[in-house]
């Protein structure tokens, strides 16, 4: 059997030595990135085929059973960086013009917690205000334990206490979500890849067929014992009452289909294998690009494809000095950056009308 070293092209995979907790890491140039799920079974296998995704995209490792995972190329990192050259650097107006004139018809959007904080939902990693810095009330051995599957089996109460706060319906989408909805309405959204579990993308009207919820969803749930499936709404009364939902069949704990550390990513995540090679524009918003394998999707599009980052800070490939000529970064407040793009598109009135209509619809639903 091939060693992990050979499978990852000179990169080492090892288990964290942190007490009571394990994790899978990829090491590159002395830096570590945490993977969000257990992927060692996918990375280190003896038989695979390689699919090439263009001049700058690198290779994919695909298993015989249809599952797959991206591997680091020897020279360029995961998927490779590509781009470069002496062509003039593109700007936000160039991106807006391409969207408006429908030059971009297969737009892939990647989003993280930063698009939901304007709706009142805390992100995970901001010092002081982030979720992980404010979990002392749950008496956890360490903050991330609240999303670890082994700890959940040991003590599910902290997660369900937090779920009461995060459960869909407690918060409403903001301008950023509705901008993506407009892309969908205009037939230009190929797929939205989200790290969020708040369900605001669904509430904004983006259908599940256009969504890849990389870290799972509250929309469905599964018994941890007999694996019986439940609609997420069936759990709401119990969760809101502060109780742990139990299966009517076997009395096992019912867990929302949120991806915990130590669990496989949903099968739907593998849609990146077909989405990213055909995308003609990648928009990245409100994410730290720190959690793998989601983070490395930023390098999965062809080198000729423009990438737009709307984010508080430069992250991922945008934090490097050697950007592609068609990389555009709009840094600062995410909502302000999206509003600037919407203004450049001439979609401001249309977006405001959509948000007003959805707000009225939500108010009527609550009254009923």
Image (cartoon, rainbow, N blue to C red):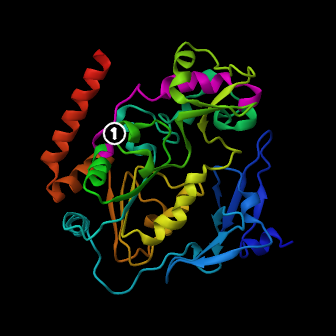
**Magenta part, dominant SS:** helix
Along the viewing direction, whichever of 9 and 27 lies nearer the viewer:
9
- What residue does disc 1 label? 204
Specify the farthest residue to the right: 1
For the question of whether residue 333 can be seen, the reply is: no
Q: In this view, does 228 lie above or below 341?
A: above
Occupied quadrant, residue 173: top left
Magenta-colored stretch includes residue 233: no
Q: Where is residue 142 in the image (x, y as percent from the top left)?
A: 68, 34
Specify the farthest residue to the bottom: 86
Along the viewing direction, whichever of 206 and 194 lies nearer the viewer:
206
Q: Is residue 254 left or right of residue 113?
A: right
Q: Position of residue 356 (x, y in %)?
A: 19, 34
Q: In this view, does 20 lie to the left or right of 217?
A: right
Question: Looking at the image, which residue is at 57% across and 16% down?
Answer: 238
Occupied quadrant, residue 283: bottom left
- Quarter of the figure that contains the N terminus: bottom right
Q: Position of residue 16 (x, y in %)?
A: 76, 51
Question: Looking at the image, which residue is at 35% across and 65% down?
Answer: 106
Question: Looking at the image, which residue is at 49% across and 81% down?
Answer: 54
Along the viewing direction, whichever of 49 and 327 lies nearer the viewer:
49
Residues rendered magenta in the picture: 152-177
Q: Is residue 36 left or right of residue 114?
A: right
């Amino acid at each position: 059997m091939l060693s992990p070293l050979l499978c990852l092209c000179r990169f080492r995979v090892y288990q964290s030595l942190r007490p009571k907790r394990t994790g899978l890491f990829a090491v590159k140039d002395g830096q570590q990135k945490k993977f969000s799920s257990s992927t060692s079974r996918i990375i280190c296998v003896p038989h695979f085929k390689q699919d090439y995704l263009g001049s700058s995209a690198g290779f994919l490792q695909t298993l015989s059973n249809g599952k797959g995972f991206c591997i680091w190329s020897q020279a360029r990192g995961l998927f490779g960086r590509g781009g470069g050259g002496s062509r003039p650097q593109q700007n936000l107006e160039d991106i807006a013009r391409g969207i408006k004139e429908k030059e971009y018809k297969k737009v892939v959007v990647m989003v993280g917690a930063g698009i939901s904080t304007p709706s009142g939902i805390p992100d995970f990693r901001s010092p002081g205000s982030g979720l992980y810095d404010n979990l002392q009330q749950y008496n956890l051995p360490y903050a991330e334990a609240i999303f670890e599957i082994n700890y959940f089996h040991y003590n599910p109460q902290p997660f369900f206490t937090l779920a009461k706060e995060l459960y869909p319906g407690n918060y409403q989408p903001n301008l950023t979500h509705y901008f993506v909805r407009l892309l969908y309405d205009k037939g230009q959204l190929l797929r939205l890849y989200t790290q969020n579990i708040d369900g605001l993308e669904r509430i904004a009207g983006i259908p599940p067929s256009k969504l890849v919820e990389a870290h799972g969803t509250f929309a469905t749930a599964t018994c941890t014992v007999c694996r019986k499936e439940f609609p997420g709404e069936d759990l709401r009364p119990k969760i809101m009452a502060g109780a742990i939902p139990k299966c009517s069949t076997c009395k096992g704990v019912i867990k929302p289909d949120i991806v915990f550390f130590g669990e496989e990513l949903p099968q739907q995540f593998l849609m990146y294998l077909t989405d990213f090679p055909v995308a003609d524009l990648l928009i990245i918003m409100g994410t730290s690009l720190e959690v793998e394998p989601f983070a490395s999707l930023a390098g999965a599009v062809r080198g000729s494809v423009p990438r737009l980052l709307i984010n508080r800070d430069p992250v991922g490939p945008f934090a490097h000095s050697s950007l592609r000529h068609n990389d555009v970064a709009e840094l600062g407040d995410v909502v302000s950056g999206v509003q600037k793009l919407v203004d450049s598109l001439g979609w401001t009135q249309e977006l405001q009308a959509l948000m007003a209509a959805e707000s009225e619809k939500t108010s009527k639903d609550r009254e009923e």
